[in-house]
Image (cartoon, grey):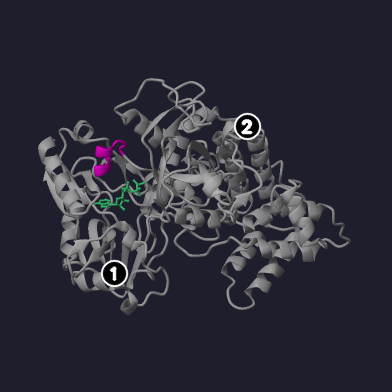
Amino acid sequence: LQSPAFDPKLREDEFPVGKPVSFSLLSGALLEIEELKGSGKGSRKTMTVILSNLFRLLMHVQPQDIIAAIYILINKVAPDYEAAELGVGDSIIIKSLCENFGRSEATIKHSLATGEAKDLGEVALQSRVSQKMLMMPPKLTISKVFSEMKAIAHSAGKDSQKAKKDKIKKLLVASRGEEAKFIVRMLQAKLRIGIQIPTLLQALAYAFTLTQPGKPNGPAAATDRRKGQAKLSASDLEPQMIAMEAAVRQAFSEMPNFDKLISALMEGRDGGSLLEVCRISLGVPVKPMLAKPSKGIAEVGERLSGKRFTGEWKYDGERAQIHVLSKDTIQIYSRNSENMTEKYPDVIQVVKDSLAEDVQSCIIDSELVAFDQINKKILPFQVLTTRGRKNIAVEDIKVNVCLFAFDCMLINGQPLVKEPLEVRREKLWKILSPSEGKVTFAVYRNFNDINEEEIQAFLDESIAGSCEGLMLKTLTENATYEPSKRSLNWLKLKKDYLEGMADSIDVVPIGAYYGKGKRSGAYGAYLLAIYDEENEEFQTVCKAGTGFSDEDLVTHYGFFKNHQRPCAETNYNVNDKLKPDVWLEPCQVWEIRAADLSISPVHTSAFGVKADGKGIGLRFPRFLRIRDDKTPEESTGSEQIVEMFEAQASISGTAAVDDDF
Ligand code: ATP
């Protein structure tokens, strides 16, 4: 973290304190990351250094720009739960390029098809460079670019296409150097350099440890001290950086909002004081707590032995985080923090009707399940997927749902996440009154220690009750609610483990192969990847061509033919032997099941973890369904793949996969 790139004093002429910061600073950092990634040197550590230096400089010059820079880096204009999506269509961008730079659509398409330009960002850059201008508009600033992005994302109505195009044209004309390329990629919401939230949080934590705002010695005091007079070295600050990273991560998991996080950091908060202001709050959905898979009752025994725990039926529906801001304002968020309030007006009414009188506000964690109210029966997940999504009127609803509540994270303004489950659940039971087929609590059984027979009996009951199996959760010790964590304090025991593999796997199609025979004219097989958070890249696990109905094949082809890429994304880690006919954008998650996992000479997931120079692959994968409630970065992680591999009863040492390549 001692990069010479950061020295506010040296760069004062270029970036005067208090003046709007030029966009070139941000595009310079993006270019540096892109080039390092392209040369295989763009490790997560290098990205953290570049980004923390960027934040430190901004902190010194114009702190508000840190928020704008972060949103630009994650291709967003607002937190996930505010439905303000960027993602301008290619056609508007092409039109803007034609009108600005006198190009034709045909030449643009030609340069993309021949690989002269890898994407529209490169087309924009090439077009901008070749155009000479007598009068250049003023330089773009970070805040200007961000405010234009926001205006573009929010523009709606009949003239919005023209308004968007005019704004894009102005941005491109004012761009210098590489800026045009990144502006277009931001507009498409595809920055393509794979910066993810954990890296940003780490970079922020480092920046705010090394450069402390509001301290008497002024900003950058810590850096200056390190440089000379005092005998502090970078390693002296390491424990503080690590502690700060933990605090920043925890703060963001409870308050996933960069505006609030950065404002708190700017006040000089760290550790506990950061969590006083960045804590679970009404109207700000947290990423839900997740469970680790388990392979069977024996493994559950090993993990929970000697602990008090509870088993709950595991319902197969849609996760719903319900925020009661007041009795008249109730919001429902998906697993992915999307606002589903419009999709479930019936649930809003049910919650309203069943809330205890003394509850003014609360946050409930639950599963919404399709329910046959006549026969009083849980219906399969597939039935739920047939429900409409937007502008649903209660009288038009054909698929009824029942809400199965299982946790409670806040009541009457008081956060409960630090309370043990036993306490949270008692409180939950008091605030809702059940009503048959509409709202109730997850069926549970408490255990004071492992009793394999009883767990088995309870598992059988859950399956007979149309559930997927059990969730086993610690009740008293280590039983806090941990937003966004896949915790060992929650284990899932699915009936599927009886069929072989402990769990299904969520993967991202990143490439496709043209079909032959009956499947010609469509894709016959797909290259599937999981997401590795540490390296922030997609790593392949298998090539899959089975489990698809004829209808699935048509649907997938129809969708992916519009989501092709001329080459692999920079964050795809793919062995040359697997090169697909077509590269795909990472934009959809599929749930698949496989017979087992084994060491693979061609797949890159968990590369080198279990065998030198080899990854882990899936054998005999089968498509199950599309997972609309997960983003590609939320697909199965490489750590989970390693855990599944280790849990597999039939591991045959270092046996290689029988790959069909
Ligand atoms: P994961 O969420 O672990 O990535 P997933 O989304 O594929 O995996 P599952 O593996 O099926 O889901 O298991 C976790 C999900 O089970 C939860 O996210 C929640 O939607 C659902 N669920 C059903 N019943 C319960 C319960 N009693 N407690 C917690 N979660 C439950």
Q: In the rendered view, tell whether residue 574 sits above or below residue 96.
A: above
Residue 614 drawn in magenta: no
Name the quarter where the N terminus is drawn: top right
Q: Answer with left or right where residue 540 lies relative to residue 643.
A: right
Check residue 347 in the rendering and tell me which mark sits there, or answer none. 1
CB atoms at circles 2 and 1 under 8 Å apart? no
The one nearer the camera, 383 or 81, is: 383
What span is in magenta? 493-502
Mark 1 surroundings: few (<14), some (14-19) or many (≥20) residues within 10 A:
many
Q: Amino acid at mark 1?
A: Val
Q: Is residue 481 left or right of residue 267?
A: left
Relative to 6, residue 81 above or below = below
In the rendering, which numbered label is found on residue 41? 2
In the orientation shown, which residue stands out farthest toward the right? 134
Residue type at the position of mark 2? Lys
Q: Earlier in the sequence, mark 2 or mark 1?
A: 2
Judged from this view, the residue extending furthest toward the front is 517
**Is 500 covered by the magenta stretch?**
yes
Hey, which quadrant is residue 390 in on the image? bottom left
Give the residue drawn at x 32%, y 30%: 648
